[in-house]
Amino acid sequence: MTTIELVQGDITRQRVDAIVNAANSSLLGGGGVDGAIHRRGGPAILEECRKLRAGHYGKGLATGRAVATTAGDLDARWVIHTVGPVFSASEDRSGLLASCYRESLRIADELGARTVAFPAISTGVYRYPLEDAARIAVDAVRAARTDVEEVRFVLFDERAHAAFAARLS
Ligand code: ADP
């Protein structure tokens, strides 16, 4: 059984086995939660991301996929980078967003992570509507077969927290 927790706050302050990053396909950093994770986690994370790009992920990480690195100076063992879809009004990309959660949990299982913190993937610069994103995230985690014991959704602001709380209750 996986317990789902909701927290309003900064994901870079969480003490968990793995922190999930809403990365972009370049894996080389960006704004939003990605920028915050690299800032607080220090250069070791980017260094490993660069190695991934130089190796198996030469074309970048595909949308809906996930890959892990060190968590550097964060209070976690790993950062799991996943690439959410950019919202589209004309195309249903919910499967790709659900895949981010599923794939991140699969990587967490491979690592042996038991506690995993997720941000609200794709709800910032990628413009996914919060209510849709919350439904997809909660449903994907509930449906996942995983050994992760605690999934903690860490929502940055009150609106995001309310959307996830509504879906959970
Ligand atoms: P995306 O490109 O996937 O939309 P963003 O980083 O722009 O990624 O936004 C994803 C979500 O992360 C947004 O809801 C944003 O408010 C939130 N966010 C930004 N910084 C943090 C942080 N330090 N901790 C948790 N969530 C954050």
Image (tube, rainbow, N blue to C red):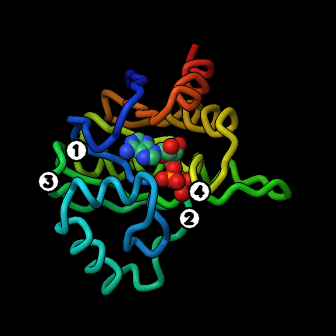
- Element at label 2: loop
Image coordinates of residue 111 in percent, x first then y, are 24, 51
Quick check: 147 left or right of 47? right
Disc 2: residue Cβ within 8 A of ligand 1's nearest atom: no
Structural distance between the alpha carbons of marks 2 and 3: 27 Å
Tag 4 residue: 125
Q: Residues within 10 Å of mark 3 (few under 14, many from 20)?
A: some
Tag 3 residue: 73
Tag 1 residue: 112
Depicted 143 relative to depicted 100: above or below: above
Which residue is located at x 48 percent, y 66 percent? 24
Residue 63 seen in the current view: yes
Mark drawn on residue 63: 2
Structural distance between the alpha carbons of marks 2 and 4: 15 Å
Which residue is located at x 55 percent, y 19 percent? 165
- Element at label 4: loop
Residue type for callout 1: Gly
Q: Residues within 10 Å of mark 4 (few under 14, many from 20)?
A: few
Give the mark toward the camera: 4 or 1.
4
- Element at label 1: loop
Residue that sits furthest to the top in the current view: 169
Q: How many marks?
A: 4
